[in-house]
Amino acid sequence: MAMNKKAMLTELQGLIELLLNHSLSPADQERLQFLLNSHPAARSYYLDYMDLHVQLKLGDKKELESRPVISDRDLRSWGAADHRRKLSRRILLSTASATAAIVFAAAMLLLWTRPSDNTTAANATQLVHSLTETAAPPLQNSPPSASRPAPPAVILEEEAGARFYHSSPLRPGDPLTLNQQYTLVEGHIVLRFSCGAQAILDAPAVFEPRSGEQLFVSFGTCSIDANNGSERFQVVTPSSLFAQRDTRYLVTVDELGGSEVHVIEGRISAIEPGITGKRETQISSGQARKYQGGGDPLPAAIAYSADRYRNRLPDRLVAFDGERNELGEIATLETVSVIRRGQLIHYSFNELIGGDVVSFCERGAAKTTNFILPLDFNGERADLCLHDNSFLTGILNPGGAVHPYLDEIQTPETTTKSSEWTPGMTIRFRKPVINSPGPDILIFDAQTAVHPLEGDFYHVRPLILKPGYSATSIRQLDIDMLSPASIPMQKFILLETSTVISSLDELMRAPLRPSNISINYRVTASSVDLSDMGLAEGESLTEIFLQDAMDNEHRIDPVMIVGLPELIDEEKVSSRRQSH
Amino acid sequence: MRTIPFDDSGQWSKTPNADERYEEFLRLFSKDRHRIFAHVFALIPHEADAEDVFQRCSVVLWRKFHEFDPEYRFLSWACGIAVNEVRNFLRTRRRSRVKFFPEPTELLSAERLAREDEFSERGIALQECLERLRPAERNLIQIAYWEEQTLKEFADATGSSLQVLYNRLSKIRKSLFDCINRRLSQENGNE
């Protein structure tokens, strides 16, 4: 249901006025942000309105424009205060201790600070009186809630790597179109219905939001949480309709329209269209049924399983940021934001555990581009192996294998036979990385749009496989080329060797030639959970071995590998979350 | 690449060549300073914060002026630098939920930059609309925007209700906004 544009703009205007009058509540902030996210017309209106405010603040523009541009002599003598001008206290303070360049900039500020008019406090009371006498009735400061249009029936509340087939990308906060079929081909999404219910869909899934209280699922897996009073919420499948009160349950729908339901909490009613009319069955917590449709045969009791039920999206890296130039291109890492144990946590670079490259073998790789370095790099070649905060330094294109290597990794430290060295690279962390819930290691990769947009896949394992340990393959990035969280990189130089490199020592000595970079790169990122390599929670490791998955001609280009600090307990998570 | 001459202490030294650059910067900056500030304010809608960022941006613009290619539009280049300063500011401040900072910064910035010429027209229309305000309305605009004291200080000094003043100001702004849109619509219709 598209929101009425006029009503939306009326609401928006009220929110902007609250903002300008310093009266915007947190709920209003969220609503204003939602409108800006959802409607191009809202952004345009916002920009127009804010421009009006600034134009008024700048005062009589014509008068300002007619004032001569400040001269060099004015600048030099500007230390003396001009008391005839009414300058804001901020500007005076900021210029008093400025350098010559800042004085210049501050002087520029003078040009848009309006001189005073003659209204004095003495006639102020009279002025207020005249205002209240001649003015129309005052506006409501806060837009009355009754006049606000209803919120969208269904919005995308959250997503993780979501891709839709033949429909525009959706971002958190976007409303979904009712009665439109969506096909989720990758990732996970959280839908929030206006009745309060939440549905988490895992790809692949085909679904159709029908109202603020009803979701039609024609294929896929859907976890429902109607545990907050959203008692009218219904899930419809080709074979049945599930209605409930205060429940959590899982629905899966197969290609033939048959559906399974597993009730995690509460009790639901399942209604089937039968040959002799509707048939209703009750399913309670801990029970599961399978429905074939058509009312016959009877729904079969099946083994209950809560394993696939999701009450949140997977733990993952959601964002990172760092020093950028005026084009928005990034050079260094400053912060990362990860979800661990379902909670969003921010870490600064200094809290991360650095990883150095200690072995390298590219045998098996088709390309020999090995170094990335900044345009102004003046360090040693060996520095590029070491951990730093730069995305513009690193060793690229390690070798790999289609299947993860599960035998003992061979490096120059274990054998002198170069033919036995295992293709890949060893990363040694500067202190142990302790297995905590969610991501433990972050791997940032340089990627370009002419390479696979979903990223370079790789295998990773502990360097030494203890019993129970194994390799894991990363075939989905948390932040790939299509993710709005990927960030363009500043320009850099690539250096390539002319021969295939077998060891780090060889790489340090090989002749290099620069390679011209004419395309833009972005930093993408993935995360590794040590649990996926068989480590128990609280176990730690110091060395990992990374191999390209050799699934195409492109190799991984890791530009930074870091470990996350240990996540101690829920209390500390909460405390850290609140501090940000 | 052009370079800026600096003296031994690292300060910009005024050679004839530097004078020319300085004059050129002054000319360009003076022409677009309002638009740059408006650009910053759209992304940081809080006066003190926006002033701080604009001030930093002004310094950065001068420092980087040697990188500016005169074949490009100064305003676009300056706004690119301004957005970067905004981003640096927001990186630390956005985590605070006390203030509202609209997102996504880059999209809003790009949309504003694409319409800069239109904003110039809106500024001209505003002057005409201000002329049409009733004296009492214009006086409140004057107090709210052009006086050194804040509206709250004015309300305190006069014993009036700040909320009433806010409400009145909101109504006047809305009427100015509608007036601008009407005038631009008429002008476009007359073309």
Image: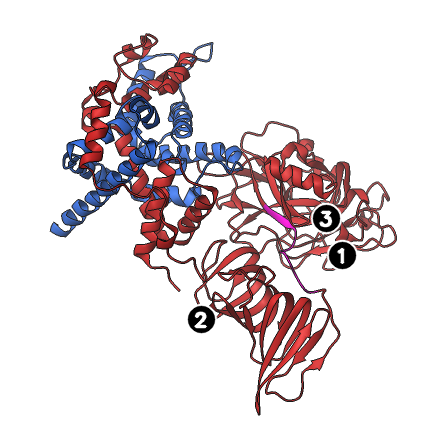
Chain colours: A red, B blue
What kind of element bears circle 3? loop
Q: CA distance from mark 1 to mark 3?
A: 24 Å
Magenta extent: A308-318
Residue A475 shows up from this direction: yes
Q: Which chain does tag 2 point to?
A: A
In this rendering, the label closer to the viewer, 1 or 3 = 3
In the image, B8 versus A24, the foreground residue is: A24
Residue at the disc numbered 3? A437
Same chain for the residues under marks 1 and 2 in the image: yes
Q: CA distance from mark 1 to mark 2?
A: 45 Å
Residue at the disc numbered 2? A179
Residue A359 shows up from this direction: no
Q: Is residue A121 left or right of residue A238?
A: left
Q: Contact (CB < 8 A) between labels 1 and 3?
A: no
Question: Disc number at residue A404?
Answer: 1
What kind of element bears circle 2? loop
Residue at the spot x=66%, y=37% of the render?
A: A575
Q: Quadrant of the N terminus of chain B?
A: top left
**Mark 3 surroundings: few (<14), some (14-19) or many (≥20) residues within 10 A:** many
**Mark 1 surroundings: few (<14), some (14-19) or many (≥20) residues within 10 A:** some
What amino acid is labelled 1 in the image? Pro
Q: Which chain does tag 1 point to?
A: A
Residue furthest to the bottom: A276
Q: Is residue A92 magenta?
A: no
Q: Say if A469 sits above or below A377 in the image.
A: below
Q: Say if B15 sits above or below A483 in the image.
A: above
Within the image, what quadrant is residue A389 found in?
A: top right
In the image, A329 versus B71, the foreground residue is: A329
What kind of element bears circle 1? loop
In the image, A135 versus A100, the foreground residue is: A135
What amino acid is labelled 2 in the image? Asn
Q: Is residue A139 left or right of residue A550?
A: left
